[in-house]
Image: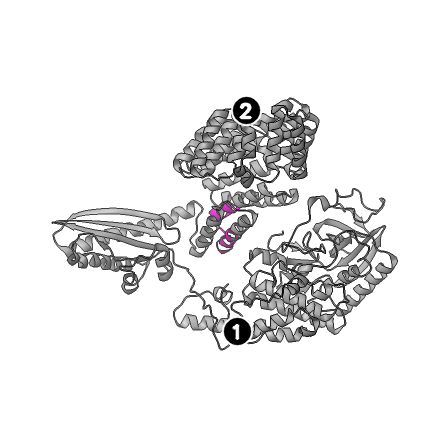
Amino acid sequence: MSTEGEPLSTEVSTPGTEVDPRPSTDRHSESPDDQRAGAPAEGSGQGDVATAGQRLATGQILGGRYRIERELGEGGMGVVYLAKDAQIAGETFAIKVLKEPLDAQALSLLREEVRRTRKLSHPNVVDVHSVNVDGQRLYVLMEYLEGKSLDGLLDEEFGRGMPFSHAWPIIEDVGAALSNAHDHNVIHSDLKPANVFVTTAGRTKLLDFGIARVSRGPLLHKRSGPLALTPAYASCEMLEGKEADPRDDIYSFACVIYEMLCGERPFGELTALEAREAAAKVTPLQGLLRQQNAALAQALAFDREGRTDSVEKLLEGLAAERPRSRPAALLVAVTIAVVAAVSVTYLELERLWLSRHSFVVKGATSEFPPTPPFNPSPHSIAVLPFTNLSGDPKQEYFSDGMSEELINALSHIESMSVAARTSAFSFKGQNADIGTIGRKLNVSAVLEGSVRRSGHRVRITAHLINTTSGFHLWSEDYDRDLNDNLELQTEIATAVAHELEARLLRSEAARIELGGTHNSEAYDAYLRGTQLAAVLGDELTHRASVKEFDRAISIDPNYALAYAARAFQLIDIVVTSKHPETREQLTREASDSARRALTLAPNLSQAHGALSFVLALGFFDFSSALAESKRAVELAPGSDLAQEIFAMTSGWGGHHDDAIRSFLAAIRLDPENFRNRINLASEYNRARRFSEALAAVRDAEAIRPDGARIGEVTARSYLAMGQALQAKRACEDPTLRVTVPLRYPHWCLALAYHQLGDLANAERELSEYLAHSGEGAAYERGELYAQLGRPTEALMWLSTAYRLRDPDLQNLKMDWMLDPIRNEPEFKAIERGLNFPP
């Protein structure tokens, strides 16, 4: 998926969404690798035989005029390229090359549909210029747009949907395009999020008129691949193969609107036919008015006769009590911002207008009123009532008085914003957590403490706590003789105030020097990102984390820590991605983020660590990666993350003593961290210390009995030791099957049976493994064939792994499974290409 602002094509869909006639369970499924076309065709295209479905190469000339710049996207019907007109300087187009040839009748019909589409001439409809033929290739010349498709925008919301204020301008634009088309007797017939494009200028365009209709006609009985029909957004009549009607577009439009507002389709995974058979009802959306939910429900009626008969009526129902245009919405938002300012509530206009859970309703309020934003000043503080630990309730005045003195003393510091006594003391006797207090009082720090009096001595303890992270920033004890109460309170309050001021200012300066930020909102987004990053989740979780780091960076473009954290998450996606092209793109992004972090904060340990992982796992430059990880440890020897990264890069390069030493240091720093313990077990495996690897696995298992890779490392260790029966038991362990991909137990058992000499069962498990794996497991296949004594196949799959930039290649230098082929010239060539340290 492209990044914000990157030019996108007018492609009707992202790969695979343009569709299989069977019901889809995923909103935006991807095309299987084995359905993709082969390598790009070489040459200029003028002398070769143009074949439908053949990939075009960069620089190739199409139709003797259009130079291919790069591929933009692929759908079920065609591949879209960015192309420049070789005859007119500066002219750029999106060219959609259909995968299958059309017969004369279909070609004529397609040209007629494009001609009709051109007559629409509407600002919300993408311009389609012409249909052309080059050999057997049929291609459509279209307007080139910059921005993002609606399905891309919805992906960024991660299933939560958009606030109405975000969705309404898009709804209006799509509605205008559809209404104009219906006025000209043109029906789209395949409206879905992938066919809605929001440009960088904020204008929404509807894509792919005409092509969809033709494919449903002459191509319907000819195509062996996916059809231009998306079941999740198609009406019952369309799914039954009836002639298209404007009300079918209205049904699809309502499906899109529903998904925009809540992140889910109206009937979940059911098609319209399945939902009708199940007598399913449309669930009203929270936050919409009754009239609006009724308007959506009518547009989603299963039968045409009961369905809304015009786009205008649907928009009218949705616009009830809503801002009807951008100027009106903006006026309401500005008015509310002025009122908020008058009432001394400092709200950013964008935060108020675009609140995710609230929106402006003319003359009414939503069921979910807007929550004031948490946007404290970096020097804002609340002093909570100090706790009286003297054991005498009569001494309460002393602890309260100390708190008041601190409030007064801190209030005299010009750079500080101090919560008033009434607000701070409202939490007295409550068991509220620091985060809640911080948000309610809108302060970045809380000072809490206790007072203990005994005879003529008093001990006062003060703690300064960050309200966002909950971390203690500073703590101090004061022991004094009790002579004059007032003098003592003033003395301690002044001392704490000076220390506090210096601590806050110093800590902020240190944060900036070490990649931090002055901006509390950016810091809040960063913390949300790190919270997601801590979850051992899937690619979706990683992308959610990246989104938060992107938000932090957009607020503070100099936030080095956010850049470093973003690089870590991107490289995590690279490691798990099954698509080489995705790996290459994300590796470049990760590299840019890590290097930007280093430019902003050259002494930031996290930035050196992030770059180390990028160099190793993205570019396979393990020597440079080791140098960066070493620098990360030098800058932060007390960081478990720095120790972990150095340990991993050392182990990949064969520096086992360094690796084990650093893993043990990381475990000492973070004893409950399962990942470091299981990685230590893997390192013992690389170092050929297999009995110690098994002991380390047991250690990791004590922390998390169901942890991923426990069964895998156990099985590998037993296989390496030649203990095939124990390896077989590990391979058959139900826990292993839960924590690893489906193919892995078969891989494991094939090796175990081979060691046992049971070749029949080994062959059976090998067949099962091959049925469940593909090129994405190329390195793993290389290991398997090396151990089975089939060196030719092993080397072939390692070469494939190298071509695909398989992240598992990190293990190649020290992997005992590859010993049988280690001296082969092809193996040595791959090893040299990975630039391992000596």
Q: Position of residue 540 (x, y in %)?
A: 56, 50
For label 2, count other residues whose C-alpha is less than 10 Å away and answer few (under 14), some (14-19) or many (20+).
some
Which residue appears farthest toward the bottom when viewing the image?
Answer: 363
Judged from this view, the residue extending furthest toward the top is 823
Amino acid at dot 2:
Gln
Residue at 29 percent of width and 54 percent of height: 447
* Mark 2–mark 1 CB contact (< 8 Å): no
Q: Which residue is mark 1?
A: 331
Residue 54 lies left or right of residue 489; in this view the side is right
Given residues 220 and 595, the one toward you in this image is 220
In the rendered image, residue 285 lying in the magenta stretch gets the answer no
Residue beneath the point at 38% across and 50% down: 508
Tell me the quarter of the picture where residue 40 sits.
Answer: top right
What span is in magenta? 548-566
Residue 549 in the magenta stretch? The answer is yes
Quarter of the image where the C terminus is located: top right
Q: Residue furthest right?
A: 104
Does residue 287 appear to the left or right of 509 in the view shown? right
Mark 2 — residue?
723
